[in-house]
Amino acid sequence: MLALSGITVRFGDRQVLSGVDVTVAEGELLAVLGANGSGKSTLLRAAAGLVQVHGGGVTVDGRPRGPLDVALVFQQIHLVRRRSVLDNVCSGALGRLPLRSSLVPALFPRVVREEAMACLDRVGLADRAHDRAGSLSGGQQQRVAVARALCQRSRIVLADEPVSALDPSAAEQVLALLAELAHDERLAVLAVLHQPDLARRHADRIVGLADGRVVLDGAPATLGTGAVDALYPASSVPELEAVS
Amino acid sequence: MSTPTVTGGVRRLPVPARPAHPRRRVVGGIVTAVVVAAHVVAWTSTEVSFGALVEGWEGMADFLSEAIPPDLSWEVLGPSLDGALVTLWIGLLGTTLSVPLSLVLALLAARGTAPSGWVYQGARSLLSFLRAVPDVVFALIFVTAVGLGPFPGVLAIVCHNVGVMGKLWAEALEDADPGPPQALRSAGAGRIQVAAHALLPTVTPQFVGLLLYRFDVNVRSSLVLGLVGAGGIGFLINQSIQLFQFDEMLTHILVVLVLIVAVDQLSALVRRRLAPTT
Ligand SMILES: Nc1ncnc2c1ncn2[C@@H]1O[C@H](COP(=O)(O)OP(=O)(O)O)[C@@H](O)[C@H]1O
Ligand SMILES: [Mg+2]
């Protein structure tokens, strides 16, 4: 469904991605792993059209990506904490609403609210619709953010470290949800993760990035632990060198 | 490097001489000279004179003996309370009526919501201009235009307050967390939708706090505006000075004191209540 081919991105004279090919199929949760600075976020931003690419292209079902084709989920969640959970989910639909029916939440049409309720139900939080978003736990907030992405009606969801700010059990829940949405709703989900074990448990496929190149691509079962561990060179561990 | 000496079990190391900075010393000397010179000029230009203060002491004593006790009869206190209320209403309306324009200019004068660099610069310049003209000057202009009374006071407060509050709000907008706006932009929301659904709800507590602070300040200003004929208790104070009714004046001043303290406490209380919910 989503195809990135030959993506090359440079910042100044530094090449951050060098001809990366990645595809995500409908109904698939793809995990992207790699050391800090290997270009994971840049790849995702290129897929979303948020950075300029110097080579290659992004297509959705064979056509150039349109502005509303992909929905994003962020590590820092980025909900409006003072608004209700339901209002936050509704705001996913802003891209297709004219200003006269979206200037303030009270103007959202009923069909949009009901669609948002269904999205909330999908992530298991329909009972919290009228609570302030900021009053929910981190894991619940990230699920609301996923519901907001669903309300955008995109068939593709891109998530940059969606569980890095969550405690382990909330992280499991959110990833299980993303996998379930991929499988049941036939979405194409691409998630940048930084814990290989989470990726192994939930992802259908893992892509490994090192220095802006794909060095690993396959189902978790076919990838040896050694191959995944090799993505994280010893030098990426914080060093405590004596200052001389 | 010298080696630490040990006396009584405590390690000590001599402090090395501080490196000399001849340039810094010269600059320091020049700055000091300029500041001192400015004060000497200011002292003579403003005709500061202890002699005048001592000679004026007698006049001051006369003034006080006439002012005390204040005239608390109802003929004075009644109009005084009415005047104080008018002053309060001038401050209130001036603050409230400046909200729409402040909001529009704040959005145009904040990076991130300004539609273009030109608009940003234009909105900033307009805000600076409105801020630079004191509200008393606006009041004098409007008194000439629409006549004596509270209405020119309201107009004057609106003009000056848009400049100040627009700037404060624009800064609050620029300091807001950029995350939620980024999220909505990526979902295809337009500029106005992003402001309405991500930015403004996030900064509401700051906006309300600044609004209350400005209300507090504007009530004080509207008092001064009365002195130049723009209605309210300031007008009464001016009148009683011109008629040498110093005991009436003291009554007015006491009423003002109560009003200002009450508004100050109220606005502080609401702002405190607001703070924890941010
Ligand atoms: N906007 C940018 N300008 C300059 N360099 C950038 C920018 N974004 C990312 N980089 C650089 O690109 C490299 C890859 O960054 P990133 O994609 O964020 O890595 P990851 O998410 O895998 O940790 C890093 O070296 C980073 O410093
Ligand atoms: Mg990253």
Image: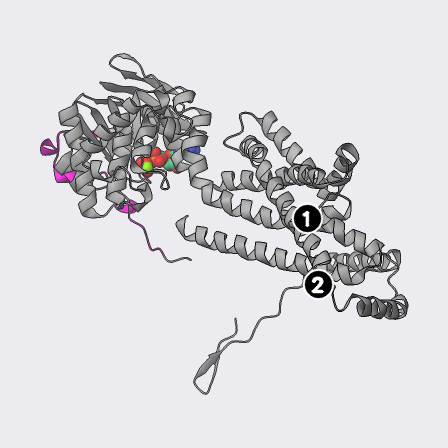
Look at the numbered disc 1 and give the secondary structure of its residue: helix
Identify the residue at horizontal 36%, vertical 32% (top origin).
B183
Residue A177 is a magenta residue? no
Identify the residue at horizontal 66%, vertical 46% (top origin).
B86
Q: Which mark is on residue B221?
A: 1
Q: Check disc 1: other Cα within 10 Å, few if <14, some if 14-19, many if 20+.
A: many
User: Which of the 4 image quarters holds residue B145?
Assistant: top right
Q: Quadrant of ligand 1?
A: top left
Left or right of A21? Residue A180 is: left
- Cα separation, mark 1 vs mark 2, equals 25 Å
Q: Is mark 1 within 8 Å of ligand 1?
A: no
Residue numbers of the magenta segment: A216-241
Farthest residue, direction left: A221
Farthest residue, direction bottom: B8
Colour convention of the picture: one colour
Q: Which residue is mark 2?
A: B72
